[in-house]
Image (cartoon, rainbow, N blue to C red):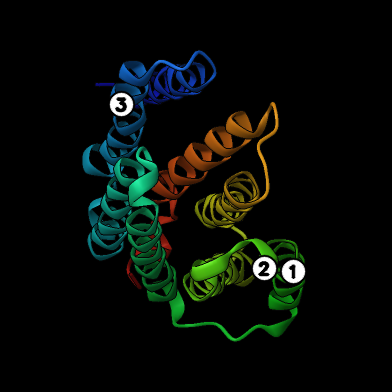
Amino acid sequence: MNKSILIILIVISVICTIISSYIDSNTMHYIFKPLSTILVILLPVLYAKNGLKRYKNIILIGLVFCLIGDIFLMFDAYFIFGLASFLIGHVFFIYAFASIRGFSWNVKTLMPLVLVAGLIFFKLKDHLGDLLIPVILYVTCIVLMAWQAINVYVWKKEYGFLLIAIGASLFLVSDSVLSYRKFIGDFTIAQFLVSSTYWTAITLISLSTIYINKKTSAAI
């Protein structure tokens, strides 16, 4: 299958997922939500560079945990399991990004992320109840993921690393909107924002396994 065709299929599946939420079609939602992530997983499976085997495998594990999280989050009763699945997925993404050149301690790129995450958490904290500690852990983890992704691009401004940086940043946006919707209140375009940023995020991270420069691949 041509890579462009697979990306088109991802877009179509994501659109169907978004539509299913607005028309309250559970059957459609149960089919297309996991299917969208499965299609994203196929990108590194089918097209990742051979020289990126270690990096690709770590990313794949992270994506599989995203798929598990997607399935859990389809049911309100399993929200905490979905949160845990995505938390584990983020840990693998952090490991993957750090595998490129080691864990980066660039504080300049961390401060804006901490500021944004802090503002979001301040808005949410009075609505979290028993989930306060899990959410703190999750926010910390996703900030670390975005931080390491951005640092890789700051280190070397190549296309594959740009995909990582944008993808991880969009993940932060998606989870912020999802948290607001879950704990404070829904709004008309919330589902569109969550879905579009989330699947764009994991698609870009998947594509990084294809577009990271060959000269860099020897290190990972």
Identify the amino acid type marked 1: Phe
Q: Mark 1 and 2 residues: CB-CB less than 8 Å, in contact?
A: yes
Q: Earlier in the sequence, mark 3 or mark 1?
A: 3
Q: Quadrant of the C terminus?
A: bottom left
In the image, residue 49 lies at what x, y percent?
28, 49
Identify the amino acid type marked 3: Tyr
Identify the amino acid type marked 2: Lys
User: Which residue is disc 3 drawn over?
Assistant: 30
Nearer to us in this view, 206 or 18: 18
In the image, residue 162 lies at what x, y percent?
58, 53
- Mark 2, secondary structure of its residue: helix
From the viewer's perspective, is 199 left or right of 68? right
Residue occupying image coordinates x 61% and y 65%:
150
The span from disc 3 to disc 2 (Cα, nearest Å) is: 31 Å
The span from disc 3 to disc 1 (Cα, nearest Å) is: 33 Å
Residue occupying image coordinates x 73% and y 71%:
118
Badge 3 crowding class, 10 Å Cα cut-off, few under 14, some 14 to 19, many 20 or more, is some
The span from disc 1 to disc 2 (Cα, nearest Å) is: 5 Å
In the image, residue 163 lies at what x, y percent?
54, 49
Residue 26 to residue 153: above or below:
above
User: Which residue is disc 1 drawn over?
Assistant: 122
Q: Quadrant of residue 105?
A: bottom right
Nearer to us in this view, 125 or 102: 125
Badge 2 crowding class, 10 Å Cα cut-off, few under 14, some 14 to 19, many 20 or more, is some
Res 148 seen here: no
User: Which residue is disc 2 drawn over?
Assistant: 125
